[in-house]
Amino acid sequence: MDEMVNVFIMGKQYSVPSSLTIMNAMEYAGYRHTRACGCRAGFCGACATIYRILGDPELKFCLACQTKVEEGMYIAQLPFFPGIKKEYDIEKIKPDESIMMQLYPEIYKCIGCGACTKSCPQGLNVMQYIAYAQRAEYEKCAKESFDCVACGICSSRCPAQITHAMVSLLARRLYGKYIAPKSQHLSKRVEEIRQGSFDKEIAELSGKPQNEIRELYNSRQIEK
Amino acid sequence: MEVMTKEMLESIKKVEATRGSRIGAELRRFSAEEKEELLNKYHPDYIKEQFATLSVGANKGQKAPIELAAMLQGRSRVLDIDVDLSKADYEADVLVIGGGGAGASAAIEADSRGANVMIVTKLRMGDANTMMAEGGIQAADKENDSPVIHYLDAFGGGHFTNKRELLKKLVMEAPDAINWLNDLGVMFDKDNDGTMITTHGGGTSRKRMHACADYTGAEIMRVLRDEVINRGIRVVDFTSAIELILDKKGRAAGAVLMNMETKEVLVAKAKTVVIATGGAGRLHYQGFATTNHYGATADGLVIAYRAGAALLYQDAIQYHPTGVAYPAQMFGALVTEKVRSIGAQLVNVDGEAFMNPLETRDVAASSIIRECTTNKKGVETPLGHGVWLDTPMIDMISGEGTIEKKIPGMLRMYQKFGIDMRKTPILIYPTLHYQNGGIEIKEDGESTKIGNLYVAGEAVGGVHGRNRLMGNSLLDIIVFGRNAGRSVAEKIKNVEMPKNSDLTIEHVKKFEEELLRAHAESGEISPKLLPTYTHGRKDRQHA
């Protein structure tokens, strides 16, 4: 049997097995999540959680599905944060400096406190990627922020009221669409298909009886 | 932190001892006969007593996993409430049920063609299996590849059971799907000259796996979600569809909705409905752990089946060969196939590479199960057994930093629980991953049985036959999501908005009566909507 620990879910005490994640411990205690639960594997950012260990003044931040419970853990969750998401037409905007100024001017009010970086459960250098966004260095911003799961914790900590996840998402889309090098082989293939270059061959293959296709499959060459 | 058992530590020494000789060694692939035998003996789909025969509905007489059959033949929530169809809380040309990759793609395409679209989703927009797809997305866009070769790979991988016209659409529209995503701003892995970095997946004969590190699905989903919001498409979140609404002619005309938080029942009427509700991993077939999203409970299949839709291959389930077997906190979570794509071998307790790591998923899962059962070469863990995925090989083959660059999500996930996969191998075991079957559709995405009802993504059956290849699901949700979006945009031109007096849910009562006549009612409320977990606590009672 697992060792039990005491945790305080929204301040209320429960005794739960020490091997469980915060998310599972809440279920063990009797909760059935509707909020603050999504992929359960660290990708979706639904389970942003803030906690403090009894006796320790430091606030800590994590994803509930990726963090084990500890004795004396006081747990609060942040299933939703009222961030700012500006609407734009990706076809009409340009990857220049004016776009950030126009959509997310609050990034220029960053005071460099580093609270965002300190709170990121993904360990990202959030303040750095905001600095890149300020300078319209979208490639750097995109790469630095790539593992962001948009949990919103950084925004809840930001004195400049920046919605970091939305800023970096804009930077990534600008990079992916306008700045990253174009894939010539891709546009070539799309055009070939549009012109019907494979129509005959695919019709032939998909029209063959199963045993013939099976033979082709079993004898096909596999690229090293 | 979790401590490895003595047996694990001893086995790791053996894995390390053989590693040098395994690097670069060509691992034989199974012959067609060997594969056949493996599947028959070890694949969970072949365990007869785990399947039930359906007594009612379009697939009467056919098999389905016990847990799915209990949902399909379960009890509808609307039987116990008076649903007032005389007023509609929502009205749209297109009602999309499901806020994952397929639903978002359908919504964007329909919206861009002028349709008034509404998305209803049980949790948040983007909470879906799409978000969790790590490895990649296939498309034959390289010089040495073609949609024809892609077709052959997928057809063989699907044991020649794929619906041919659907598979043809999948491979022929694949490059355009990548192009579309790229134009929306998805950050694909590329070389400096723009060439897509592509790798193998299990069962591919060409390197056509495109990726965005190991956040491929997450990157695609967050861009699609952003695009849905930018377009001002109406999203009603934390709201499930608990039944379809039909018109007097038996065509789809909306859905009965339920607010997940307040339990309020609402009515949405629409000219067309797109089911994009995804998979069923959270039904935990045969007790397997799952890689799936919290909401993957086959809702769309259940409500469509009650309304008369036919399913296809509802008995074919994909078990991903590499789910986390240790540590317990991540039990069942996905270890992306990309880990094998970039060089990690599957190794048993004695340090032997017992198979080629790039067999198709069903064969690989069966082989791992055989290694742990009949061959008794698995590694015991606190929760069962598993085999090693020898991850330190990756950096040894491709240089230090490869793991950090190519699979950062995996590295981080293990690090959070005290394991550095660059230095120690990881323990894996097959986990419930994908619903190969689903609702049967025509080429334009419409149900073969119910007019004005379209289906896209994992809820569809037939695209992949009885076994899907890695990277064809992310592709499927984009290709068939867009396909459904384009089709409904055309369809609504010739469909009148149904009158409230024409709306009906009588089919639910009829289905229930048939169930009672056949003594086949499972008694379970369905769709399930969300699973219930207690994590081993048995004495829990709720008021």
Image (cartoon, coloured by chain):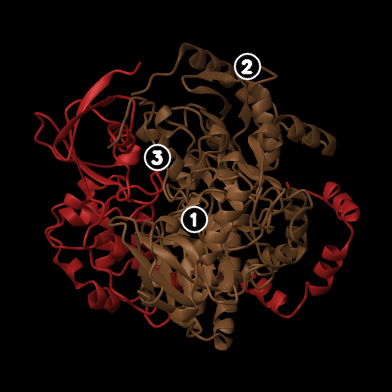
Chain colours: A red, B brown
Q: Amino acid at mark 1?
A: Thr
User: Where residue B7 sits in the image (x, y, percent)?
Assistant: 51, 13
Left or right of A3: which side holds B343?
A: right
Q: Residue at x 50, y 55 (%)?
A: B299
Q: Which residue is mark 3?
A: B532
Mark 1 and mark 3 residues within 8 Å of each other at the beta carbon: no
Q: Nearer the viewer, mark 1 or mark 3?
A: 3
Mark 1 neighbour density, 10 Å: few (under 14) some (14–19) many (20 or more)? many
Q: Report the chain holding disc 2.
A: B
In the foreground, A101 or B450: B450
- Marks 2 and 1, how far apart at CA: 36 Å
Q: Secondary structure at mark 1?
A: helix
Mark 3 neighbour density, 10 Å: few (under 14) some (14–19) many (20 or more)? few
Mark closest to the chain's N terminus, 1 or 3:
1
- Marks 3 and 2, how far apart at CA: 38 Å
User: Where residue A105 sits in the image (x, y, percent)?
Assistant: 20, 73
Q: Which residue is mark 2?
A: B350
Q: Nearer the viewer, mark 3 or mark 2?
A: 3
Q: Residue at x 16, y 28 (%)?
A: A72
Q: Report the chain holding disc 3.
A: B
Left or right of B281: which side holds A141?
A: left
Give the label on residue B130, or none. 1
